[in-house]
Structure formats: structure tokens, C-alpha cells
Amino acid sequence: MAKFTKKKKGTPAISTSSLPDIIFMLLFFFMVTTVLRETELKVQNRLPKATQLQKLEKKSLVSYIYIGKPKDTEKYGTEPRIQVNDALVTPKEIPNFVYAEKDKLDEVERDKITMSLKVDVDAKMGIVSDVKQQLREADARKVNYSCVQSIDKQ
Amino acid sequence: MRKKSRSAPEINASSMADIAFLLLIFFLVTTTIASDKGLSILLPPKNDQQLDVKMKERNIFKVFINSNNQLLVEEQLMSINQVKDAAKKFISNNGRDPKSSESPQAAVISLKTDRGTKYEVYVAVMDELKKAYNELRAAYMGITLAEYLQIENDPKKQTAKFEEAKKAIPYQLSEAEPTNVGGN
């Protein structure tokens, strides 16, 4: 005689086996989006070493200017050049870049803009002082020479 | 007694989520850490009319780096690692030596470069000058240099004493327009 036993009563356990998949998907999303967030460098950029460093406070107020020997020497020559965003520019174009960067900020924060100069160790002071002069012109007076922390010899 | 119904035992996958979360948090934290550090300076405002500031010769500490990356400090040839001590001596003179500064507040360091000076050397000199000031401030506050740097980089730790040290030994560096000997 066939017997039909009734199924046990009670709430069935919710299957959590798909939860890891969801989390993994999130994980991959973050891995992919966070890594590729820097402008492609067209100039060589080995930063100098220094010990007395100061941190830059607010990332949103910082704009970057790269100076160094172009990587593509056949196209741009061997003299150090200035790169902002994705283009190589002449010192004269820097004020325009600064104004564009300032426009992105809130009005109250505009004078707090900090220019981070990422200059290659082999660059000469001539080009750096040209940039500084143009920054004065554009009234972006806060400048930070980007450096790498070196271990103190003392 | 009834036997339990047979079925493949279920693998508990609930901890898998925790592992994935751990990984997720790890990546979230590590990817944003690369912070920007550097030497900060404030450029002078642009003004067309040349302001003539009268300063006593004794209060100016002249540093010149030529296009061969040689250093001239107060008319003396120096190597980079001697600059810090010379600057410290100058700033903390307090009027003792009639040729050196009157007080730390009056002392100004004038840094001049050439267009042909290597950037690396310029940064190294700036770093040494900054270090001279930082060491004096640290000594003023009675702490070590490492502790001072930590305080400087953390606004939460900055006490009244830090402000006082900043005021007593202000960082005054003036940069002259570069000469053009080895330039392009």
C-alpha cells in the first residue's frame, strides 16, 4: 500500500547560493572601474624624492600638470613638454586650462584650486618657471610639487 | 522511528558571500589609498607695478643654483647637505651675528635658479630648506621631526601650540625670476 507521508511543515530555508554571485559581480564592477582612472601619460614622469612632504587635502580641488620628455620622441622631439589632460600644450595655453578647471568647481571654492606639478627629474627649471609664471597669470597660486617619499638618511 | 528521507546534503554557501565581501572591501580600500604628496608653495600674486620692499641685507639668506647645478649660499659654494644647517643657523640667529638675521620672523630665504638648473636639484634644495624650518618648529614645540610632520599632515592634531610655532618661525621663501645662462 502506498503511503503518502505529508511533508514536514516549516518555512523553507531561503537559498543564499546566488548571493556570492551578486557580490562577485559588484566586486568585478569596482575592480574594473577603479583601476582605469588616470590620464594616459604622454611624457616621461619620474618624480623626484623628498622627505618633508605635505598631503593634498581635497582631491576635487587638485588639477594636474605633467612636465617631462615626450615618450614619442619621433613625433614631439626630445625637449621636455607640458601635458594637461590628454594633450601636450605650450605654456601660453595654461591659463585657459586653469580657467576651464576653475569652471568645474563651485564658485566658493575657486580660489582654493591647487595645481599639482608632476615634473620629471630630468626637466630643467626653465620650463617649470614658465609654467609658474602662467599660473600666477591665471591666479592659481597654490602649487604643489609632486614628490615621492624618500627614506630619511638621518 | 522513521528514517530521515535521503537526499544529497546541501553545501552551505552562506559564507561565500562573506568571503566575497571581504575581497570587495579590500579592493575598495586599496584602490583609493594612492594619495598625492609633495612640497607645497604659494606663488606671489601677479602685479604689474614692481613693489619695492625695503629689507635689510642681513635678513636675506641668498641661495643660488646655477646651470651646472652648483649651489651658492651666501656667497659660498656649498653642497646640498650643508644647506640645511646653514639655513637653520641663519634663521635662529636672533641678532647675535651682525651679518645674519635679526629674528626668525624677519628672516627670508631667497631662492634663485637658472633656466638650466635641473628640477631634481631644485626640489632637493627646497626640501632641505623646508626641513630646516620644520626642524626648528619641531624644536620649538619640543617634539621630534617625525611627530611634527604627522601633525602638519593631520588637521585634527593641529593644536594651538602648532599655530604658535608656525607664527614664531614663519616659512618665508621668496623665489626670484630665473637667470638665463644654460636655458633653452
Image (cartoon, rainbow, N blue to C red):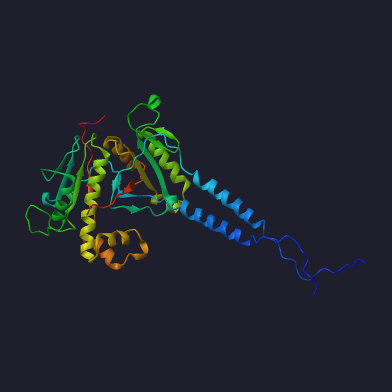
The residue located at (42%, 37%) in the rendering is: A41
Q: Name the residue at the left extreme.
A: B98
Residue A74 percent location from the top left of the image: 39, 24
Nearest to the observer: residue B15 or residue B64: B15
- Percent position of residue A22, x then y: 63, 54
Location of the C terminus of chain B by quadrant is top left
Residue at point 42%, 53% (across, down): A58
Is residue B169 visible in this depiction of the protein? no
Up/down of A82 relative to B129, above or below: above
Image quarter hosting the N terminus of chain B: bottom right
Tell how many labels: 0
Residue B12 appears in which quarter of the rendering? bottom right
Farthest residue, direction right: A1
Question: Residue A1 vs residue B133: left or right?
Answer: right
Residue A23 % position (x, y): 60, 55
Question: In the image, is residue B89 above or below residue A38?
Answer: below
Q: Is residue B115 left or right of residue A1?
A: left
Q: Residue furthest bottom?
A: B1
Q: Is residue B76 above or below residue B135?
A: above
Image-based side of B151 in relation to B33, left or right: left
In this rendering, the answer to whether B113 lies above or below A9 is above
Q: Percent x, y for residue B166?
A: 25, 60
Residue A34 shows in the view? yes
Front-lying residue, B54 or B78 = B78
